[in-house]
Image (cartoon, rainbow, N blue to C red):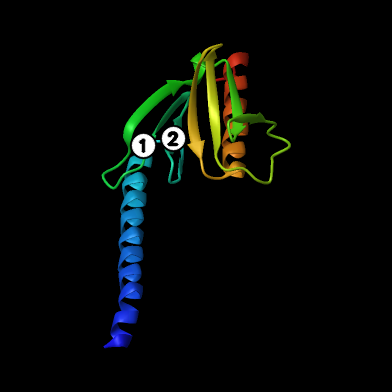
């Protein structure tokens, strides 16, 4: 009987982990279906992001699909910055540590939008790609 009581917390932890895994699987599957309509997309626990031509769409992942979906046009963006712990960093000299990374899209001096990322290198990759897209738009290549 005592051994059974000792294993009960472990059983509860296993059930909780299994439920968390199933929940995350459902989020990824909903994201996969949503992302099929875009050229390029990313998923992480903070946000889903997708790009089609000069339009970016992002939202919060859920089991039913992204919610709080927002869209912006790169044509309206003045600058794109990578933030780590809410401080701008150079895309070529990435910090090795940081709690939260995000891409900031600046429209005007006091107007910006931040899209969170869990991984700094992934945020930097997206930042470089989107800065190139923005440069192409400015130069009229697209």
Q: Is residue 103 above or below residue 78?
A: below
Q: Is residue 52 left or right of residue 120?
A: left
Residue sitting farthest toward the front? 2
Local secondary structure at mark 2: strand
Is 120 located above or below residue 6 in the figure?
A: above
Viewer-nearest of discs 1 and 2: 2
* Mark 1 or mark 2: whose residue is earlier in sequence: 1
Instruction: Compute the Cα span from label 1 to label 2.
Output: 9 Å
Q: Give residue 119's position: percent from left, percent from top.
A: 56, 45
Picture quarter with the N terminus: bottom left
Residue topped by disc 1: 37
Tag shown at residue 52: none
Q: Relative to 65, is 48 on the left or the right?
A: right
Where does the image place residue 126, in percent across and percent down from the top left? 57, 36
SS at mark 1? loop
Question: Which of the two residues, 19 or 2, is positioned nearer the viewer here?
Answer: 2
Name which residue lies at 33% across and 51% down: 29
Q: In the rendering, which numbered label is found on residue 50? A: 2
The image shows residue 69 at horizontal and vertical percentages of 34, 30
Q: Quadrant of residue 131?
A: top right
Which residue is pictured at 57% across the width and 29% down the height? 130
Viewer-closest of 53 and 58: 58
Foreground residue, 8 or 65?
8
């Amino acid at each position: 009987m005592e051994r059974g009581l000792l294993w009960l917390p472990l059983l509860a932890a296993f059930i909780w982990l299994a439920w968390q895994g199933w929940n995350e699987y459902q989020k990824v599957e909903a994201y996969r279906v949503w992302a099929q309509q875009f050229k390029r997309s990313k998923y992480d626990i903070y946000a889903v992001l997708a790009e089609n031509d000069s339009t970016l769409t992002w939202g919060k992942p859920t089991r039913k699909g992204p919610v709080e979906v927002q869209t912006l046009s790169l044509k309206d963006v003045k600058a794109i910055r990578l933030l780590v712990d809410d401080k701008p960093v150079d895309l070529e000299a990435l910090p090795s540590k940081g709690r939260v990374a995000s891409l900031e899209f600046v429209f005007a001096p006091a107007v910006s939008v931040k899209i969170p990322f869990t991984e700094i290198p992934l945020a930097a990759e997206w930042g470089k790609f989107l800065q190139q897209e923005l440069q192409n738009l400015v130069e009229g290549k697209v």
